[in-house]
Image (cartoon, rainbow, N blue to C red):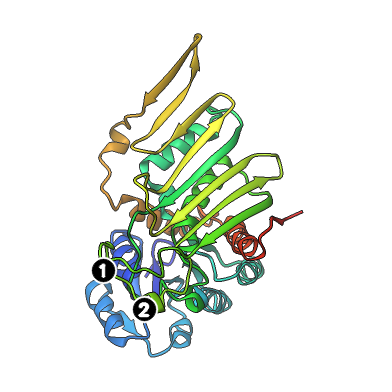
């Protein structure tokens, strides 16, 4: 195999996110070869190998056995949050590049260790924020980068569901995950807001978390009723984040809220020249020739033909390209660390009942 044109990938964790996103997306990347698999359930690992693996692919009995394979250059970490740091660090120490599922880690201290190991070993580390690769996200990022909105000084990060609590796996387990909707879906919305604003310097965070509906259960929940006794994370979290340059971000995240105003992995941006939002489509608003305007953005052919899963496929292709061409990934470890630090500050602020300062 020509190592300059293809990479061998090991999949650690063969659960829902692997089967739903990573495996099918990587299978469409010509330069990617899925050659190694591990899961705590050997049956799932074997299923992943059979469906997506190369003819010479192997299932390993332990993570370390997979990491010891010198033919594996890249590892995808798709395991519970409390294992992200341990596995990612071991993989980079073994010479592998790592794409880790979001959030970066269970704690910001773990995320910091991951970044330090990446910098020391020279191994690439990226975090799976695939919503950056959506057509509307890329269009809006381009508009922001070109200065079309001017200085973006206020943003809203939206991650609200009415009744869509994930009842499988360990999503409801505080010990395994470190949190609920904030660290699960709020993290995507926050990442988008920071990326659009190109602002990674928080000053203060004031956060609140709630467990108002977790205790009730919900027969109407999208994925079936949950067991309140096993629901040990928050059901909603909200925060006001102030940046060092004075900009502010309002973050809303919930798996279950009595509201009709639902949006997930979306942002609203307010700048000195114009504003934009993703709510119900992509819109830009402002003032022109003495009149207020609102423009519904209809994406051109290069955008409109994209399939629903294209964001994950674009993420996979961009990640492999970064490795083969030796450039920084679209989502850097430093950016992932700031997201993690803000998330942790929100939980800390909620627990203390006061704002947390980064200064």
Residue positioned most to the left = 51
Q: Is residue 83 above or below residue 259?
A: below
Query: Horizontally, is 296 left or right of 233 in the view?
Result: left
Which residue is under mark 2? 36
Dot 2 crowding, Cα within 10 Å, few <14, some 14–19, many 20+? many
Badge 2 marks a residue whose secondary structure is strand
Residue 224 bears which disc, if any?
1
Query: Horizontally, is 324 left or right of 46 in the view?
Result: right
Residue positioned most to the bottom = 61
Query: Horizontally, is 341 left or right of 219 in the view?
Result: right
Q: At 61% from the left edge and 72% from the top edge, which residue is drawn?
A: 110
Q: Position of residue 108 (x, y in %)?
A: 62, 67
Image quarter where the N terminus lies is bottom left
Q: Is residue 153 above or below residue 116?
A: above
Q: Position of residue 301 (x, y in %)?
A: 28, 33
Q: At 40% from the left edge and 61% from the top edge, which residue is drawn?
A: 5
Q: Position of residue 201 (x, y in %)?
A: 67, 49
Q: Position of residue 276 (x, y in %)?
A: 46, 32
Dot 1 crowding, Cα within 10 Å, few <14, some 14–19, many 20+? some
Q: Is residue 12 visible?
A: no
Asked if the residue under mark 2 is in contact with the one under mark 1, i.e. CB atoms within 8 Å, the reply is no
Residue 350 bears which disc, if any?
none
């Amino acid at each position: 195999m020509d190592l300059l044109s293809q990479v061998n990938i090991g999949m650690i964790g063969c659960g829902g996110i692997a089967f739903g996103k990573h495996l099918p997306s990587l299978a469409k990347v010509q330069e990617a070869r899925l050659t190694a698999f591990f899961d705590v359930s050997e049956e799932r690992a074997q299923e992943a190998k059979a469906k997506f693996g190369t003819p010479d692919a192997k299932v390993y009995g332990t993570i370390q056995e997979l990491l010891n394979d010198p033919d594996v250059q890249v590892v995808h970490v798709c395991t519970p949050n409390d294992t992200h740091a341990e596995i990612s660090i071991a993989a980079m120490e073994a010479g592998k590049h790592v794409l880790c599922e979001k959030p970066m880690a269970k704690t910001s201290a773990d995320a910091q260790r991951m970044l330090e190991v990446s910098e020391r070993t020279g191994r690439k580390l990226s975090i799976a924020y695939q919503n950056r690769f959506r057509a509307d996200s890329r269009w809006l990022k381009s508009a922001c980068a070109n200065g079309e909105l001017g200085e973006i000084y206020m943003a809203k990060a939206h991650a609200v569901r009415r009744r869509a609590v994930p009842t499988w796996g360990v999503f409801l387990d505080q010990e395994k995950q470190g949190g609920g909707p904030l660290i699960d879906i709020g993290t995507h919305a926050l990442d988008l807001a920071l990326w659009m604003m190109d602002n990674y310097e928080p000053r203060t965070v004031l956060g609140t978390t709630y467990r108002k509906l977790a205790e009730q259960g919900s027969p109407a929940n999208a994925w079936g009723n949950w067991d309140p006794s096993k629901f040990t994370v928050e059901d909603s979290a909200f925060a006001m984040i102030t940046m060092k340059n004075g900009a502010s971000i309002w973050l809303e995240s919930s798996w279950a809220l009595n509201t009709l105003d639902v949006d997930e992995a979306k942002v609203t941006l307010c700048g000195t020249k114009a504003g934009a939002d993703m709510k119900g489509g992509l819109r830009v608003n402002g003032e022109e020739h003495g009149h207020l305007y609102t423009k519904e953005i209809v994406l051109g052919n290069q955008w409109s033909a994209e399939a629903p899963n294209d964001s994950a496929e674009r993420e996979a292709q961009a990640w492999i390209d970064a490795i083969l061409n030796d450039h920084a990934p679209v989502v850097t470890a430093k950016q992932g660390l700031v997201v993690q630090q803000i998330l942790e500050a929100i939980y800390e602020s909620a627990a203390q009942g006061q704002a947390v300062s980064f200064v």
